[in-house]
Amino acid sequence: MYVSNLLTYSLGYNTFQISISWCKIRTMILEVFCLCSLFSICFLSFDQYLSTNVRFSWRKISTRKLAHHLTCCNICFAMLHSITFLIFTEVQSSLGCTVYNPTMQRYYSFACYPIIASLLSMTITLAFSLPAYHNVRRITRLQLLVIRRRLALQMTAMTLARVLVLIVCGLPFICSLLWKLNINTPEDNYLGLTIFSLISSILDSVFYANFAINFYVFLMVSSRFCRQVKNIILKKCWALVKTRRHETPSYIHRNQIFFEPIQPSGSVYELT
């Protein structure tokens, strides 16, 4: 996305208006990554609910194998669903690179964005993140180690913060997509097209920030995560830089000459 925008600004014209193939591929890739990121948060809240559950049998389900299976299912679903964008995306002068097929517009307007990308994903996320928060509040009843309880508290706080960021940044973007699919602005209405383009650019930037600010959100929410980052940056990385700076270059070691002491042979001792 950023590469395509950079090409547009550097070349002086919109690359999507010229290459229909680039328009289709770009839209499909954007949809794949958006769905993967969206449902990864759903699976994260589900895994957090399992790991903080009071029942030990449910906590045993939360394993690395389950995470691998859920990730594979997420990627397969996102790729299969995004094939429709590769097929039906077109380029027109009014709204540019988008879907103009009436049947697919109805699907995206009434099924994809309102249900799959909004209602379903947020319902799953809230349905598991809120009970996970409730489980963490009564986690003191469980016979767990203190470190284990603190980790559960930190992970639940990070999950809830990630869910809130998704809702705040994702809902305006989905509303703009629904507006783009359902409202036909006349081509001669230059003021309306300009205002809509400006609003879409702002909402797109907010939506892209959803994927870029995770690191900073976790820094503000989790004290343990902040300490780990500080430990890595100040101790390990800075220590590595200091050792590399004071380290003698390897070519100096190769060109050095060392004198080895001559060991007396056994014949000398025999003569004495």
Image: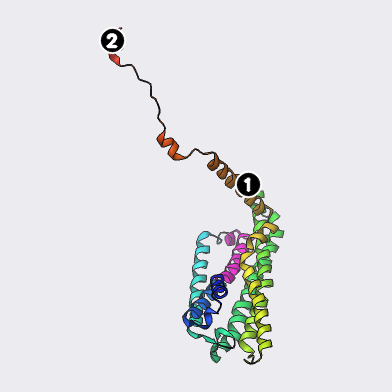
Query: Which of marks 1 and 2 precedes in the sequence?
Result: 1
- Lateral position of residue 193 relative to residue 251, left or right: right
| Residue 5, horizontal then vertical, whole percent | 57, 73
> Distance of mark 2 from mark 1, alpha carbons?
62 Å
Extent of the magenta region = 35-59
The answer to which image quadrant residue 159 occupies is bottom right
Q: Residues within 10 Å of mark 2 (few under 14, many from 20)?
A: few
Question: Is residue 176 at least partly visible in the picture?
Answer: yes
Q: SS at mark 1?
A: helix
Q: Residue at x 49, y 80 (%)?
A: 24
Q: Amino acid at mark 1?
A: Leu
In this rendering, the count of numbered labels is 2
The answer to which image quadrant residue 154 occupies is bottom right
Question: Is residue 123 at least partly visible in the picture?
Answer: no
| Residue 228, horizontal then vertical, whole percent | 63, 50
Q: Residue 80 got which mark?
A: none
Q: 134 or 18: which is nearer to us? A: 18
The answer to which image quadrant residue 181 occupies is bottom right
Q: Residue at x 40, y 30 (%)?
A: 257
**Disc 2 designates what residue?**
270
Q: Residue at x 69, y 59 (%)?
A: 136
On-image quarter of the C terminus: top left
Q: Residues within 10 Å of mark 1 (few under 14, many from 20)?
A: few
Q: Amino acid at mark 2?
A: Glu
Q: 39 or 136: which is nearer to us? A: 39
Q: 196 or 78: which is nearer to us? A: 196
**Disc 1 designates what residue?**
234
Residue extending farthest to the right is 137
